[in-house]
Image (cartoon, rainbow, N blue to C red):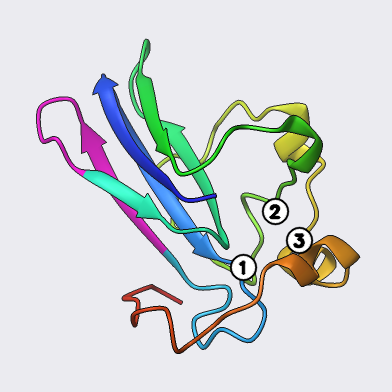
Amino acid sequence: MGKLMRVTVGAAFLVAVDIRKGSPTLGKWVGIEATAENRRSVWAPAGFARGFCALADGTEIQYKCTGIYNNKCESAVRWDDPAIGIQWPLTDVAVSDKDRTAKTLAQWLATPESDNFQANSKLEPELSLRS
C-alpha cells in the first residue's frame, strides 16, 4: 500500500526506498527532515519500503494509507543495508528487533514475497531518488 508520512509532533528523518523488481530506481531512496513546523511529508507509493528516524523525544509520525493494515503481510528491509546506503542523520540509534533482524534488499529480493512488487513503467512516473 502507499503511505503519506508526516510529523505531527517533534522531528524525524522520513525515508522511502524503491523495492520494485524491474524498476530503474530499484534500491534508490529519498529522505527528508520533517517537522510539525515545516509540514514536509514523504509519499511512498506501493512497492516502496518506508522508514523513519526520530530526531526528537516524543516525536509523532502520522501515516495516511491507501489500504488497510494487515500484519500478516508485513515485511522489512534492513535499515542500514550498505547496498542502499541511506544517509541517516544519527548513528547511535535504538532499533526494534524487527528492524535489527530484517533482510538486506538482496536477500529480500530473493524471497517469493518480493515477486508481488513489480515495476510497471507505463503507469508510474519517473522518481527522483538517491543512490
- How packed mark 1 is, by other alpha carbons closer than 10 Å (few <14, some 14-19, many 20 or more), is many
Label 2 near label 3: C-beta < 8 Å? yes
Which residue is labeled 3 in the image? 104
Report whether 120 appears left or right of 109. left
x, y (%) of residue 110?
A: 87, 72
Left or right position of 21 against 107: left
Measuring from the top left, give residue 20's x and y in whole percent.
61, 73
Q: Which residue corresponds to the image point at 73% horizontal and 41% vertical from the top-left? A: 74
Q: Of the two numbered discs 3 and 1 on the same chain, state the one appearing first in sequence.
A: 1
Which of the two residues, 37 or 126, is positioned nearer the viewer here? 126
Residue of label 2: 77
The reply to whether dot 1 and dot 2 touch (C-beta < 8 Å) is: yes
Image point (46%, 77%), residue name:
131
Q: Position of residue 50 (x, y in %)?
A: 52, 48
Front-lying residue, 22 or 78: 22
Q: Is residue 17 positioned above or below 65 on the image?
A: below
Give residue 84's mark: none
Closer to viewer: mark 3 or mark 1: 1
Q: CA distance from mark 3 to mark 1?
A: 11 Å
Q: Looking at the image, is mark 1 or mark 2 nearer the viewer?
A: 1
Query: In the rendered image, is residue 86 in sight?
Result: no
On screen, 46 above or below 13? below
Q: Assess disc 2: are there few (<14), some (14-19) or many (≥20) residues with their C-alpha within 10 Å of its C-alpha.
A: many
- The answer for how far apart the CA atoms under marks 3 and 2 are is 6 Å
Residue hosting label 1:
19
Instruction: State the residue at coordinates (56%, 84%).
Output: 23
Give SS at disc 1.
loop
Q: Is residue 78 above or below residue 38?
A: below
Q: Residue furthest left?
A: 37
Residue range of the region highlighted in magenta in the rendering: 30-40
